[in-house]
Amino acid sequence: MTAYVLDANVAAKWFLPPAQEPLVSEALQILHDLAGGRTRLVVPDLFWPEFGNVQWKAVRAGRVSQRAAKEAIAAMDALAVATAPSRPLMKTAFDIATAFERSVYDGVYVALAVSSGAPLLTADERLVNAVGSRFPVRWLGAFQ
């Protein structure tokens, strides 16, 4: 079974209108692998407010209805993805953020990938370009 740290930007693609989202088929493959028991996912606890914020922004932009956003949040919750606390990751996350000029939020995801031994799967190509040569970070566009 393959394990990944899942970035909220990948999970959001499962629920946003696909016409406006790149890499939807790659993201949906992760969901299918999860449903089929071929993939295990873990997220930091900050994933949940980030995912909710993506849904809120989509409602504000008129991309989805409030009802659809609430359904997406409920569906994501129903997947029961393992969630790790971010507090123990903060020192490493801060070190990554300052060394690579990334946000501490990004650093938490990368630090979880390091501590869990599962690569971070992200749709953020700039993050991959910034830290991918030093840390286990994979771009969704290269996912097969």
Image: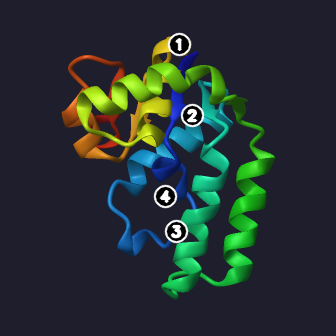
Up/down of 105 relative to 133, above or below: below
User: Which residue matches tag 1?
Assistant: 115
Secondary element under disc 1, as helix, strand or loop, is helix
Determine if residue 84 is in view: yes
| Eye-nearest disc, 4 or 2 | 4
Up/down of 68 relative to 95, above or below: below
User: Which residue matches tag 4?
Assistant: 13
Which picture quadrant has residue 98?
top left
Q: Are marks 2 and 3 in contact (CB under 8 Å)?
A: no
Is residue 14 toward the left or the right of residue 74 in the image?
A: left
Of labels 2 and 3, earlier in sequence is 3
Residue at position x 45%, y 27% in the image: 93
User: Which residue matches tag 3?
Assistant: 16
Secondary element under disc 3, as helix, strand or loop, is loop
The three-letter amino acid code for the residue at tag 1 is Ser
Which picture quadrant has residue 36?
top right
User: Where, quadrant-wise, is the C terminus in this rendering?
Assistant: top left
Q: Are marks 4 and 1 in contact (CB under 8 Å)?
A: no
The three-letter amino acid code for the residue at tag 4 is Lys
In space, the residues marked 3 and 1 are separated at their CA atoms by 30 Å
Residue at position x 26%, y 38% in the image: 101
Secondary element under disc 2, as helix, strand or loop, is helix
In space, the residues marked 4 and 1 are separated at their CA atoms by 26 Å
Is residue 38 toward the left or the right of residue 67 in the image?
A: left
In space, the residues marked 2 and 3 are separated at their CA atoms by 19 Å
User: Which residue matches tag 2?
Assistant: 33
Of labels 1 and 2, earlier in sequence is 2
Is residue 122 toward the left or the right of residue 34 in the image?
A: left
| Eye-nearest disc, 3 or 1 | 1
| Eye-nearest disc, 4 or 1 | 1
Which picture quadrant has residue 44?
top right
